[in-house]
Image (cartoon, helix red, strand yellow):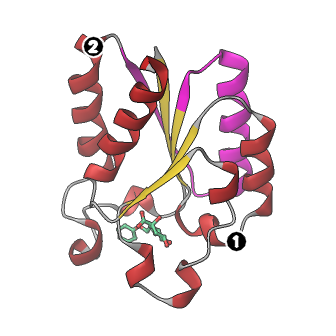
Amino acid sequence: MKFIIINGPNLNMLGQREPGIYGSESLEAVLQRLRDRYAPKGIQIDIFQSNHEGALIDRLQQAWREGCDGIVLNAGAYTHTSVALHDAIRAIAPIPVVEVHISNVHQREAFRHTSLISAACSGVICGFGTDSYRLGIEALAQMHES
Ligand code: CA2
């Protein structure tokens, strides 16, 4: 089984700024731990991060061409603005996409309460810190089991 974790803008700054909101561990460290955890279970996890909306869309389309089994997507601030990402997620159906957020966006500014991508995703996980990524992978694995 092959999953991809796709991260949007500024998430490359994880662990370097705003530890109170996003934690103190780097994105690489968080995601490498996940790869190590799931590899023995036969789950390969690819990782991608970009600060550019079009690059995220390209990676989603590439995932579809590769026959990827599921995607965990933290689209960062594009979550709240991007019709193009919504369309891209719909375009790669039936690949399941789980929307994740490190922070609980509903406890934050009003502009973070709206997601333009949720309706295109299989489900949403938010507010569990960087453990949201693991929960996203678990959700995908569960979907494939049942
Ligand atoms: O909580 C999340 O995972 C977010 O997707 C993170 C986005 C934010 O725009 C969303 O509303 C919620 C921001 C990512 C910025 O990441 C940083 C990490 C460390 C330091 C500064 C920014």
Instruction: Please provide percent x and percent y for residue 28.
Output: 30, 43
Dot 2 beta carbon under 8 Å from ligand 1: no
Q: Quadrant of the C terminus?
A: top left
- Residue 11 vertical placement versus 43 (above, below): below
| Badge 2 amino acid | Lys
Instruction: Please provide percent x and percent y for residue 83.
Output: 79, 62
Q: Which residue is mark 1?
A: 81
Residue visible at 57% across and 69% down?
77
Considering every residue shown, the one lying at the far bottom of the view is: 110
Q: Is residue 53 magenta?
A: yes
- Residue 117 vertical placement versus 120 (above, below): below
Q: Which span is picked out in magenta?
A: 43-70
| Badge 1 amino acid | Thr
* Ligand 1: quadrant of the figure: bottom left
Quick check: 141 left or right of 14? right
Instruction: Please provide percent x and percent y for residue 128.
Output: 27, 60
Q: Which residue is mark 2?
A: 41
